[in-house]
Amino acid sequence: MILATDHAHGRHSNVRRRLLVPLLLCVMATGVVALGGCKVQKGAPGQDGKENADKGPEAVPVEVATIGRRPIAASYAGTAPLEARADAQVVAKTSGVALQVMVEEGMRVRAGQVLVRLDSDRLRLQEAQSAAQVRKLEANYARSLKLAEQKLISANDIDQLKYDLENARAANRLAKLELSYAEVRAPISGVVASRSIKTGNFVQINTPIFRIIDADRLEATLNVPERELATMHAGLPVSLQVDALPGKTFTGTVDRVSPVVDSGSGTFRVVCAFDNGGVLQPGMFGRVRVDYASRADALVLPRAALLEDEAKPAVFVVRGGKAVRAPLALGYVEGEWAEVRSGLKQGDQVVVAGKSALREGSAVQVIAVDGKPVAVAPAPKAKADAGKKGGSR
């Protein structure tokens, strides 16, 4: 009985073993299929690549400006320091002690005004001595003429007295001139720029003691390339800006043009004159612009739109949502504007910002026109994603 039972138990175990093995194999196979199915499910929506391919390259955000019309001028610009039209060093023409200094730095003086009085006692005595000699010789000459009528004096003696008298008169005039030098006078009208004398100083002859400048009219000299020689002439309008007075513009005219070109530098001199209202000062450094031609209704574009790496002028124009390279011919250039002679028409939109990322035919997205922001619509992809989310619900 025991043997029969054990035999039956072993038989049942073998039966269970034979049933479990196929079941495990089936479960394992099912898992592999499931995992494989998951992989297929993950890779199945392979439509992302297709969507990206259909979408194409992203649009480049750019700012554009509209081509329009405005006045523009042809000009030549340069830099130069301002100089006083008249600048005089006042020197003492005689020696002496300064008894009275009558002006200070910054004072306005007129031509002929007395600036300094020097000690003139010695000069006055010399003038008196020469005057006495003249009177003596005049008397001698008058007597000689009476004697000549009586044939009591030779013609040679009369001539000698005449020459002596003329010499004495010249010496007297020189003494008077020296005496006048004791009063140092202003040679020009203007402002006293510097003073190097004080009351009581002994002044040597030909010593500079004052500097006077005429600041009512200032000049700026430009060295202009010879290619501009035909465009420059007297009377052209000139504008001036100085670093010391930012935001202010002063007007003047071309005063004179040198007809000679310097062979070393290849330039010629153009002198511009400015009437000063007391604001400008000699020595200020200024930016000068000479306008030699103008157009009242020119087709212009911002210079910022020009492609810098091009041998010939060109811009990117927005047409049909794409960037199109457009070569053009330029005319006058003034400040931030350039005249368009050919290649564009009024109303065209040229790229002024973002052009470095563009190529011919690049898709563009305009974010600003003439400096004003443009409302950008939501991207189509965002709308599609929202629709998918709604459908999944």
Image (tube, rainbow, N blue to C red):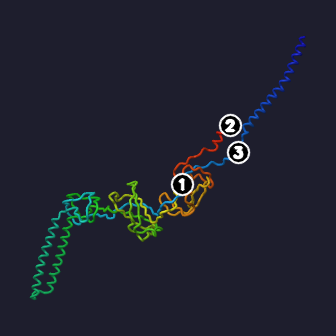
Circle 2 — which element?
A: helix
Using a 10 Å C-alpha cutoff, classify the residue at mark 3 as few (fewer than 14 neighbours), some (14 to 19) or many (20 or more): few
Where residue 143 appears, as percent x and y from the top left, is 10, 82
Q: Earlier in the sequence, mark 1 or mark 3?
A: 3
For label 3, the SS is helix
**Of the image marks 2 and 1, the number of the one nearer the N terminus:** 1
* Residue sitting farthest toward the bottom: 151
The residue at the point 56 percent across, 47 percent down is 375
Give the label, 1 or 3, closer to the camera: 1
Residue 391 circle label:
2
Q: Can you say which quadrant of the picture contains the N terminus?
A: top right
Instruction: Name the residue beneath numbered marker 1.
Output: 65
Q: Which amino acid does label 1 sit on?
A: Ala
- Left or right: residue 105 versus residue 284 is left
**Quadrant where the C terminus lies?**
top right
Q: Position of residue 341 (x, y in %)?
A: 54, 64
According to the picture, the residue beneath numbered tag 3 turns out to be: 50
| Residue type (three-letter) at the residue carrying disc 3 | Lys
Give how far across and how far down residue 315 sits, in percent: 57, 57
Q: Which of marks 2 and 1 is in front?
A: 2
